[in-house]
Image (cartoon, helix red, strand yellow):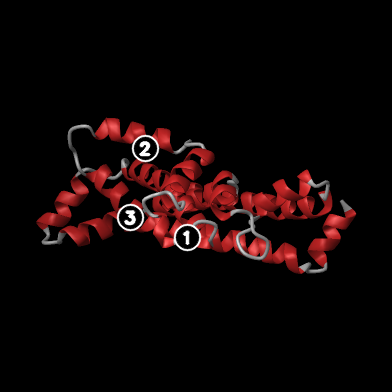
Amino acid sequence: MGRAFELLVSGDREVWFITWTSLRFSMSSALIACIPGIPLGVLIALRRFRGRRVLLAVLTSLMALPTVVVGLIVYSLISRAGPLGSFGILFTPRAVILGQAILALPIVVSMTASGLSSLDPLFPEVLTTLGASKREVLWMSVRQSRGAVLSASLASFGRVIGEVGVAMMLGGNIRWYTRTITTAIALETSKGEFELGLALGMVLLVMALGVNAALHWMVRHE
Protein backbone atom coordinates (compact mmCIF):
# COMPACT_ATOMS: atom_id res chain seq x y z
CA MET A 1 0.00 0.00 0.00
CA GLY A 2 2.83 2.38 0.85
CA ARG A 3 4.49 1.77 -2.50
CA ALA A 4 1.20 2.49 -4.25
CA PHE A 5 0.91 5.86 -2.49
CA GLU A 6 4.50 6.59 -3.39
CA LEU A 7 3.77 5.99 -7.08
CA LEU A 8 0.93 8.50 -6.92
CA VAL A 9 2.71 11.18 -4.91
CA SER A 10 5.96 10.93 -6.86
CA GLY A 11 4.14 11.55 -10.15
CA ASP A 12 5.13 8.23 -11.69
CA ARG A 13 5.07 8.78 -15.46
CA GLU A 14 3.37 5.50 -16.35
CA VAL A 15 0.63 5.89 -13.73
CA TRP A 16 -0.35 9.33 -14.93
CA PHE A 17 0.00 8.45 -18.62
CA ILE A 18 -2.43 5.56 -18.12
CA THR A 19 -4.75 7.82 -16.15
CA TRP A 20 -4.72 10.48 -18.87
CA THR A 21 -5.28 7.82 -21.55
CA SER A 22 -8.35 6.53 -19.69
CA LEU A 23 -9.71 10.03 -19.23
CA ARG A 24 -9.14 10.90 -22.88
CA PHE A 25 -10.83 7.75 -24.14
CA SER A 26 -13.76 8.04 -21.74
CA MET A 27 -14.44 11.73 -22.29
CA SER A 28 -14.21 11.33 -26.06
CA SER A 29 -16.54 8.34 -26.15
CA ALA A 30 -19.05 9.97 -23.78
CA LEU A 31 -19.07 13.11 -25.93
CA ILE A 32 -19.54 11.10 -29.14
CA ALA A 33 -22.42 9.19 -27.51
CA CYS A 34 -24.06 12.43 -26.33
CA ILE A 35 -24.08 14.06 -29.80
CA PRO A 36 -26.76 11.71 -31.20
CA GLY A 37 -27.95 10.34 -27.85
CA ILE A 38 -29.32 13.53 -26.31
CA PRO A 39 -31.43 14.59 -29.34
CA LEU A 40 -32.71 11.01 -29.70
CA GLY A 41 -33.65 10.91 -26.02
CA VAL A 42 -35.47 14.24 -26.31
CA LEU A 43 -37.39 13.09 -29.40
CA ILE A 44 -38.41 9.82 -27.75
CA ALA A 45 -39.59 11.73 -24.67
CA LEU A 46 -41.57 14.36 -26.60
CA ARG A 47 -43.01 12.25 -29.42
CA ARG A 48 -45.81 9.73 -29.07
CA PHE A 49 -45.52 6.87 -31.54
CA ARG A 50 -46.32 3.17 -31.81
CA GLY A 51 -43.71 1.00 -30.17
CA ARG A 52 -42.40 3.78 -27.92
CA ARG A 53 -42.73 1.72 -24.73
CA VAL A 54 -41.01 -1.23 -26.34
CA LEU A 55 -38.17 1.00 -27.53
CA LEU A 56 -37.70 2.43 -24.03
CA ALA A 57 -37.68 -1.08 -22.57
CA VAL A 58 -35.04 -2.18 -25.08
CA LEU A 59 -32.89 0.87 -24.34
CA THR A 60 -33.15 0.22 -20.61
CA SER A 61 -32.05 -3.38 -21.18
CA LEU A 62 -29.12 -2.27 -23.32
CA MET A 63 -27.85 -0.11 -20.46
CA ALA A 64 -26.68 -3.33 -18.81
CA LEU A 65 -25.18 -4.79 -21.98
CA PRO A 66 -21.97 -6.72 -21.09
CA THR A 67 -18.88 -4.89 -22.28
CA VAL A 68 -17.35 -8.04 -23.75
CA VAL A 69 -20.39 -8.45 -26.01
CA VAL A 70 -19.94 -4.91 -27.35
CA GLY A 71 -16.23 -5.58 -27.75
CA LEU A 72 -16.88 -8.82 -29.63
CA ILE A 73 -19.39 -7.21 -32.00
CA VAL A 74 -17.15 -4.24 -32.81
CA TYR A 75 -14.12 -6.53 -33.10
CA SER A 76 -15.91 -8.65 -35.71
CA LEU A 77 -16.64 -5.50 -37.69
CA ILE A 78 -13.21 -3.84 -37.62
CA SER A 79 -10.91 -6.88 -37.67
CA ARG A 80 -9.08 -7.65 -40.91
CA ALA A 81 -11.74 -10.17 -41.89
CA GLY A 82 -14.58 -7.79 -41.00
CA PRO A 83 -16.43 -5.40 -43.31
CA LEU A 84 -14.62 -2.38 -41.83
CA GLY A 85 -11.22 -4.03 -41.58
CA SER A 86 -9.79 -1.92 -44.40
CA PHE A 87 -9.82 1.13 -42.13
CA GLY A 88 -7.15 -0.47 -39.95
CA ILE A 89 -8.38 0.92 -36.63
CA LEU A 90 -8.21 -2.29 -34.57
CA PHE A 91 -5.87 -1.97 -31.56
CA THR A 92 -5.85 1.83 -31.83
CA PRO A 93 -7.36 4.56 -29.62
CA ARG A 94 -10.08 5.08 -32.23
CA ALA A 95 -11.24 1.49 -31.83
CA VAL A 96 -11.51 1.84 -28.04
CA ILE A 97 -13.38 5.16 -28.30
CA LEU A 98 -15.77 3.70 -30.89
CA GLY A 99 -16.58 0.68 -28.73
CA GLN A 100 -17.02 2.75 -25.59
CA ALA A 101 -19.26 5.23 -27.42
CA ILE A 102 -21.52 2.35 -28.52
CA LEU A 103 -21.57 1.13 -24.91
CA ALA A 104 -22.51 4.59 -23.62
CA LEU A 105 -25.15 5.45 -26.23
CA PRO A 106 -28.10 3.51 -24.72
CA ILE A 107 -27.39 5.10 -21.33
CA VAL A 108 -27.51 8.61 -22.77
CA VAL A 109 -30.69 8.00 -24.78
CA SER A 110 -32.55 6.14 -22.02
CA MET A 111 -31.64 8.52 -19.17
CA THR A 112 -32.35 11.61 -21.28
CA ALA A 113 -35.77 10.24 -22.28
CA SER A 114 -36.56 9.30 -18.68
CA GLY A 115 -35.45 12.69 -17.40
CA LEU A 116 -37.60 14.57 -19.88
CA SER A 117 -40.66 12.42 -19.14
CA SER A 118 -41.43 14.76 -16.24
CA LEU A 119 -41.57 17.73 -18.62
CA ASP A 120 -45.04 19.22 -19.08
CA PRO A 121 -46.49 17.72 -22.31
CA LEU A 122 -47.88 21.15 -23.18
CA PHE A 123 -44.42 22.75 -23.09
CA PRO A 124 -43.47 21.90 -26.73
CA GLU A 125 -46.95 22.86 -27.92
CA VAL A 126 -46.74 26.25 -26.24
CA LEU A 127 -43.34 26.91 -27.83
CA THR A 128 -44.67 25.91 -31.24
CA THR A 129 -47.67 28.20 -30.78
CA LEU A 130 -45.31 31.04 -29.98
CA GLY A 131 -43.55 30.47 -33.31
CA ALA A 132 -40.58 28.36 -32.24
CA SER A 133 -39.05 26.07 -34.84
CA LYS A 134 -38.51 22.36 -34.25
CA ARG A 135 -34.84 22.96 -33.51
CA GLU A 136 -35.71 25.69 -30.99
CA VAL A 137 -38.28 23.43 -29.32
CA LEU A 138 -35.60 20.73 -29.02
CA TRP A 139 -33.06 23.16 -27.58
CA MET A 140 -35.50 24.70 -25.06
CA SER A 141 -36.60 21.23 -23.92
CA VAL A 142 -32.97 20.32 -23.27
CA ARG A 143 -32.42 23.55 -21.34
CA GLN A 144 -35.56 22.95 -19.29
CA SER A 145 -34.30 19.50 -18.30
CA ARG A 146 -30.59 20.25 -18.26
CA GLY A 147 -30.11 18.42 -14.96
CA ALA A 148 -31.32 15.16 -16.47
CA VAL A 149 -29.19 15.69 -19.56
CA LEU A 150 -26.07 16.35 -17.50
CA SER A 151 -26.83 13.32 -15.35
CA ALA A 152 -27.07 11.18 -18.48
CA SER A 153 -23.74 12.53 -19.72
CA LEU A 154 -22.00 11.86 -16.41
CA ALA A 155 -23.54 8.40 -16.13
CA SER A 156 -22.23 7.50 -19.58
CA PHE A 157 -18.76 8.67 -18.57
CA GLY A 158 -18.95 6.65 -15.36
CA ARG A 159 -19.95 3.57 -17.33
CA VAL A 160 -17.03 3.68 -19.75
CA ILE A 161 -14.28 4.81 -17.36
CA GLY A 162 -14.64 1.59 -15.37
CA GLU A 163 -15.17 -0.91 -18.19
CA VAL A 164 -12.49 -3.38 -19.19
CA GLY A 165 -13.91 -5.66 -21.92
CA VAL A 166 -14.07 -3.12 -24.76
CA ALA A 167 -10.72 -1.53 -23.93
CA MET A 168 -8.98 -4.92 -23.73
CA MET A 169 -10.49 -6.45 -26.88
CA LEU A 170 -10.32 -3.41 -29.15
CA GLY A 171 -7.25 -1.64 -27.77
CA GLY A 172 -5.04 -4.64 -27.14
CA ASN A 173 -3.70 -3.18 -23.87
CA ILE A 174 -0.64 -1.77 -25.66
CA ARG A 175 1.76 0.02 -23.33
CA TRP A 176 2.12 3.79 -23.91
CA TYR A 177 -0.66 3.64 -26.50
CA THR A 178 -3.99 2.03 -25.61
CA ARG A 179 -3.47 0.82 -22.04
CA THR A 180 -6.19 2.15 -19.72
CA ILE A 181 -6.59 2.05 -15.94
CA THR A 182 -8.76 -1.07 -15.97
CA THR A 183 -6.67 -3.03 -18.46
CA ALA A 184 -3.48 -2.06 -16.64
CA ILE A 185 -4.93 -3.22 -13.31
CA ALA A 186 -5.92 -6.56 -14.86
CA LEU A 187 -2.45 -7.03 -16.37
CA GLU A 188 -0.36 -5.90 -13.41
CA THR A 189 -2.27 -7.93 -10.83
CA SER A 190 -2.02 -11.02 -13.03
CA LYS A 191 1.77 -10.53 -13.01
CA GLY A 192 1.82 -10.00 -9.24
CA GLU A 193 2.66 -6.27 -9.56
CA PHE A 194 0.12 -5.20 -6.96
CA GLU A 195 1.69 -1.78 -6.25
CA LEU A 196 0.90 -0.32 -9.67
CA GLY A 197 -2.50 -2.01 -9.67
CA LEU A 198 -3.34 -0.51 -6.28
CA ALA A 199 -2.19 2.95 -7.34
CA LEU A 200 -4.38 2.85 -10.44
CA GLY A 201 -7.24 1.38 -8.41
CA MET A 202 -7.09 4.39 -6.06
CA VAL A 203 -7.25 6.76 -9.03
CA LEU A 204 -10.24 4.88 -10.47
CA LEU A 205 -12.00 4.91 -7.08
CA VAL A 206 -11.56 8.67 -6.78
CA MET A 207 -12.97 9.13 -10.30
CA ALA A 208 -15.98 6.90 -9.52
CA LEU A 209 -16.69 8.74 -6.28
CA GLY A 210 -16.39 12.08 -8.07
CA VAL A 211 -18.87 11.07 -10.77
CA ASN A 212 -21.35 9.73 -8.19
CA ALA A 213 -21.03 12.85 -6.06
CA ALA A 214 -21.66 15.05 -9.09
CA LEU A 215 -24.72 12.99 -10.05
CA HIS A 216 -26.21 13.20 -6.55
CA TRP A 217 -25.54 16.94 -6.40
CA MET A 218 -27.26 17.57 -9.73
CA VAL A 219 -30.26 15.39 -8.88
CA ARG A 220 -30.70 17.13 -5.54
CA HIS A 221 -30.46 20.62 -7.01
CA GLU A 222 -32.63 19.75 -9.99
- Asked if residue 103 can be seen in this view, the reply is no
Dot 2 lies on which element?
helix
Question: At label 3, which amino acid type do we have?
Answer: Pro
Q: Is residue 107 above or below residue 94?
A: above
Determine which of the numbered discs, if any, sits on residue 58 in the image: none
Q: Is residue 102 above or below residue 50?
A: below
Question: At label 2, which amino acid type do we have?
Answer: Leu
Q: Earlier in the sequence, mark 1 or mark 3?
A: 3
Determine which of the numbered discs, if any, sits on residue 36 in the image: 3
Q: Where does residue 199 sit, x and y in percent of width and height?
A: 77, 55
Dot 3 lies on which element?
helix
**Which residue position holds label 1?**
89
For the residues labelled 2 and 1, the Cα–Cα distance comes to 27 Å
Q: Residue furthest front?
A: 81
For the residues labelled 3 and 2, the Cα–Cα distance comes to 14 Å
Location of residue 138 by image quarter: bottom left
**Which residue position holds label 2?**
59
